[in-house]
Image: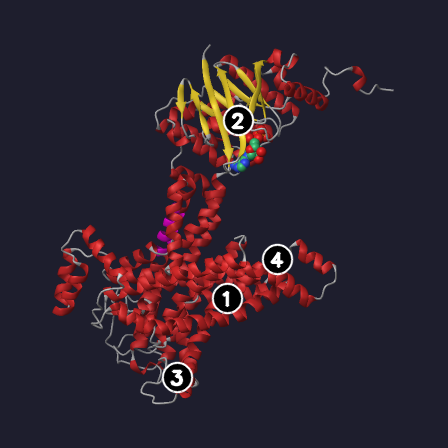
Amino acid sequence: MFVSASDLHVLNTVLPEETFNSFKEYYAPEKPVAEQLAIYIKNLVRFDLGSSFYYKMPVAEIIAGRIGWTLLLSFVSISISALLGIPMGLNAARRGGRGGKYLLSCFMALQSLPVFVLAIVFQLLFCFKFHIFPSGGAYTLGMNANIIDLSVDVVKHSVLPVIILVLVELPPIFSLTYNVCARTKEEPYVEMARYFNLSDRLIKFKYVLKNSLPEILSKMNIQFLYAISGILFVEVVFSYPGIGTLLKVAASSRDYPLLQGILLITGFYGVVINLIFELIIKKVNPRF
Amino acid sequence: MSKKIANKAAWAIVITMLSVGAFYPFISPYNAADFSFRPLMDPSTAHLLGTDEMGHDLLSMLLAGFRITLTIALAAALISTFIGTVLAVACAYYKNWVDTVIVKLTELFIIVPEIVVLLFFAVLAKPGVYNTILAIALFSWSKVARIIRAKSITAIEKEKIQYTLLLKGSIWHVLIKMWRELYPAVATMFIFQCSKAAVYESTLAFFGIGDPLAITWGRMIRTALNYEGIFTGGAYLWYLLPPIACVCIFVVALSVLAYDFERE
Amino acid sequence: MNILLEAVGLNKKFNGNTTVLNNVCLKIRRGGIAALIGESGGGKTTLCRVFTGLEKASSGKVLFKGKELGTLRGRSFDDCASLQYIFQDPYAALEEESTVSSVLQEPVNMCSRRGRDYMPPQEALTWAGLAGAAFLGRKIKTLSGGQRQRVSLARSLITRPDLIIADECTAMLDAQAAAEIGRIFKKLNQKLGLSFLIVTHDAQFLYQVVDYIYVLHEGAIVEAGPKDRVLNIPSAGYTREYMESMWEIEGGGLIEQDHLCQPQ
Ligand SMILES: Nc1ncnc2c1ncn2[C@@H]1O[C@H](COP(=O)(O)OP(=O)(O)O)[C@@H](O)[C@H]1O
Ligand SMILES: [Mg+2]
């Protein structure tokens, strides 16, 4: 994003003096666009993302302080979804019939709902009506406890966000597994195994799962990327102190440097996930 | 059999919602902008959904939300489906670097979620209904382009369409010629985009971006959540849940329709 | 001799390695009906598609009226209009749901847009042996294979071409319909001076319609000459094999009597 002098004029009138000055220093809007770009890239390389209007701190520092919580939610929820979704998909595909298709259409409907709406409804039920879980945050503020109590506290705070994330991440993993396994099941070597009267269990794990797994794994990167937008909204509803809540603050206070930093960090996350998966795919199945 | 019923119900819901949006001034009990009522009234026969903390009649706001939310959803979906379809046909028509660039662009939207890019640009834009529509339309075409591109690449190899290429038909001639082949997929994508646009609109409003004056379901959800006492009394029942229910019903009905279209 | 179309050293490789055309050189005279014969998979369709520009040659060039023709994108509309192509499959080449008149309208529109003189659809239909105004209103899906192929022919006459390339355009027709197409080609050739390049396996065509024959074998032209010479004294070994196998299938008159069963 490049800033023209007229944009700057608008900002000058709404921003406090010092913020405005640091903004001006970072983007150098009086210089030509090519030079702006050069400065900007130089800054990026040094991990200098500018300074937030709202927090009056370097953007890189703010993001670094928050990203851990987001990664925690992301990895925990995706692991659980994969551990549930892959066996469910495999079983549904093996049994065939209507069950799997029925589950698939229910999941389709669930998937189309806005994530934050699901989060609000869950928060309403489990936090405000039944008081089972804390309604927000990642831990109880001001708690002076030992490490065990603290861990329990953190887990308790993350249960609800994780459940909601699993609800939105499970359907695509389920349908991916279901479709891939349903296809593998029709392959001649599986038919052959059935013909030889091998046990159902053996067929399921040795033939269907083992031959489907590479394809499933190779497409899981989409799940990681897809999960990120869900995480951002769940965080906002539960005031979970990750990137999502930061995004909310940045959006509602029109904090451009912070917004831009978040945009870049999600892009960076996507690129890294893709690279990791490319490596995994090469290891698991060189033919892709 | 049950599939048919679900499909009919979904059509009925969508058509009812669109008619409510079209005719809401005739069924709305009050003017949605009128805030002269006593604030925070519980539901009564005069105010079926009570009033908000400013003194608006909530039912009238909800009904007004039908028009603006659905207009945003339809308009954004129309534009994004159009953009996606044209880019997809351009991939098949020009091939080579045009195809590569467009495919790379759609991949970019997988790496950075659409909604994050959309939020970024919606914040930059002046708040307003038009800008909301444009922002949603400009950043949500990637799936349309991906799906229609695959269809176009097979369609353009068909002999009846190659004839148009032989007569040096332009991309528009080819698009029109291919329309019969593309139409089912485009219709499915349009329905899908409507649902997505409604979700994006409510998400933008939830983040406090968008036209602060336009009454949409998303903004009602936002103001309900901003109200301190929303969860302490029963206010969420008539303040928060109705707009949430409207968004969910609309979106689910559309996804049922899109799903059925895809099957055909 | 007046050369209409010339191929100079055409090579075509698919996916970088499989050679389909191997240094093809040929000249097509203006005002003649030339046939291209050869085994299935020998590259006849590929050669035709290179001539029309649908396929790009790996090397070599195509000259049309002495001018080099580039890829489809590089050709002028006039070049495209004067070199028409009839597809093999009459069921794939025309849109099932359209009417005959709308099929014929497409080249009319293209020509009038670019200011090229065109033949009225009614006249083109008459040439193709489909007289009657009622025919214009027929849906393509109600037509037989032979009628469709004649509609295709009428469509290509509209741009007033100099050369029509027909790729096995009778392969999917019964003998009678094929013979009718042959008579129409002959008439167009005599009355309008139209030139043809016909890919065919049909012995009747070779004997009665064609006046010049090219034999394509494994991507190369192995024999070329006037019909009578190639059919009666084939010089290349492959051509001799081809003729023999053709007569075995066709059961014509050239084979010795003891190859036929005598009625008891
Ligand atoms: N698009 C393509 N990609 C790869 N190979 C092709 C393609 N089109 C044709 N071929 C190959 O080129 C060869 C010649 O095909 P074709 O020109 O259709 O032969 P013919 O028309 O003489 O039967 C065939 O072996 C075919 O498999
Ligand atoms: Mg062929």
Q: Quadrant of the C terminus of chain C?
A: top right
Q: Position of residue C244 (x, y in %)?
A: 70, 20
Residue located 47% across and 59% down the image: A279
- Label annotation for residue B157: none
Which residue type carries mark 2?
Asn
Which callout, 4 or 3, points to the residue nearer the camera?
Answer: 4
Chain containing mark 3:
A
- The residue beneath circle 2 is C22
Distance from disc 3 to disc 2, alpha carbons, whole Å, reads 76 Å
Query: With B2 as the anchor, is B189 left or right in this view?
Result: left
Q: Is residue B48 visible?
A: no
Badge 1 and badge 2 both on one subunit: no
- The residue beneath circle 1 is A171
Magenta region includes residue B80: yes
Which residue type carries mark 1?
Pro
Q: Nearer the viewer, residue C252 or A216?
A: A216
Q: Is residue A121 above or below residue C143?
A: below
- The residue beneath circle 4 is A184
Q: Nearer the viewer, residue C82 or C192?
A: C82
Distance from disc 4 to disc 2, alpha carbons, whole Å, reads 42 Å
Pointer 3: residues within 10 angstroms few (<14), some, or many (20+)?
Answer: many
